[in-house]
Amino acid sequence: MSDTSRTLTIRRPDDWHVHLRDGAMLQAVVDHTARQFARAIVMPNLKPPITSVDQARSYRERILQALRPERRDRFTPLMTAYLTETIAAQELERGFTEKVFTAAKLYPAGATTNSDAGVRDLKAITPVLETMERIGMPLLIHGEVTDPGIDIFDREAVFIEQHLEPLLRRHPALKVVLEHITTADAADFVTSGPANLAATITPHHLHINRNAMFLGGLRPDFYCLPVAKRERHRLALRAAATSGNPKFFLGTDSAPHPRGAKESACGCAGIYNAPYAIESYAQVFEQEGALERLEGFASVFGPRFYGLPLNKGSITLIRDGSEVPALMELSAGADSTTLLVPFHAGEDLNWRLEDSPAS
Ligand code: DOR
Ligand code: ZN
């Protein structure tokens, strides 16, 4: 890393958790991720979900085709399998061995967007988890219980106690990433857990607490899952992300939904933070006096955990600011556009990536 107060150059980062969607939305959003990140772990919660090697291969191809041609050999989508109660362990093993699947994603059924086909009873996938443990394939977890009787703000902490802890005891060698953590409970659990347990942290959970959803009215653009929690949890996440502990690394959980689907009577969960993600993280690290630790979090700890090589190139951030638009009208294929509200809409951020979203 080189830091001359006006510029910050770090090894090219990766995004270890992103929703790129498909079709017109994929077309609209993919370059925002590819302009910053060399690789991204692509979530499989499409309709229908990605549950086979063939589906993942063709989705990967669609992602590459949606990129600007000059970015096609600079960006690698890392594909994931969506775990169902009926998925065959052999299919996962084949996908992992053939380097199509990098990891598998566990959605508790009903926890979030397109999770209906997810897992109701974790014991049902024991043979699958045993296989993953044996071959070193990481398990990525949306860690929330779905019981409507459990308060939505407690669902992550309860999941850890009721499901994650026993799962780690049953599968002591399984590599597990607890995705998009939102609580001090999760940060503590991961910190004190074994080396094969890590977590990703989003930019939005570092910037906002639950008040953001209700600031002067109902603000659907700040609604995501797991929902943002109290201020003390946000502070714990900032401490974890900027601590230099390699168990915490970058995963944006950028989750685009068209403006109309968010601002509706039953708005979708998800924050579209891809356009200014690295700038958003840089702001947090600067505020915490930890800019020298951004590179570890963004570019080193993720690949080390996944057992992948570090990226070769670098990116440079310039300290002259980014003006985030209030609304983005993005081209979504032939003659069509989609309206997305980006995270930090209408705000100024301190940093600007040399290659800005407009370019
Ligand atoms: O807010 C979220 N949006 N959380 C998720 O877990 C899924 C995501 C989506 O796909 O929209
Ligand atoms: Zn997600």
Image (cartoon, rainbow, N blue to C red):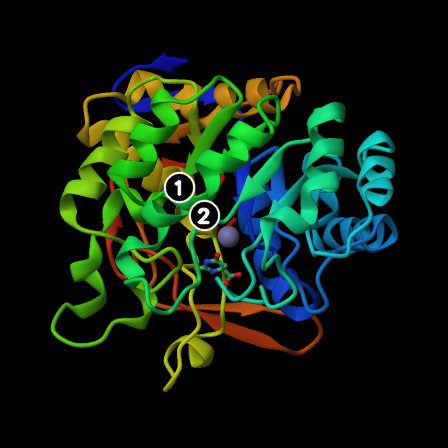
Is residue 332 toward the left or the right of residue 319 in the image? right
User: Which residue is rendered at x = 87% and y = 37% of the image?
Assistant: 94
Is residue 246 toward the left or the right of residue 240 in the image? right
Q: Nearer the viewer, residue 27 or 212?
A: 212
Identify which amino acid the numbered label 2 is placed on.
Gly
Please determine whether, in this image, residue 331 is positioned above or below residue 236: below
Q: Using the numbered discs, state the Cα–Cα distance from disc 1 to disc 2 in whole angstroms.
A: 7 Å
Q: Mark 1: is the Cβ under 8 angstroms from ligand 1?
A: no
Q: Position of residue 258 (x, y in %)?
A: 49, 73
Q: Residues within 10 Å of mark 1 (few under 14, many from 20)?
A: many
Q: Which mark is residue 160?
A: 1
Give the residue furthest to the bottom: 265
Q: Which residue is tagged 2?
A: 143
Marks 1 and 2: CB-CB under 8 Å? yes
User: Which residue is rendered at x = 32% and y = 32% of the image?
Assistant: 187
Q: Mark 2: is the Cβ under 8 angstroms from ligand 1?
A: no
N-terminal of the two: label 1 or label 2? 2
Q: Position of residue 77 (x, y in %)?
A: 69, 41
Q: For numbered disc 2, what is the local secondary structure?
A: loop
User: Which residue is rendered at x = 23% and y = 51% of the image?
Assistant: 208
Would residue 355 be visible to someone looking at this image? yes
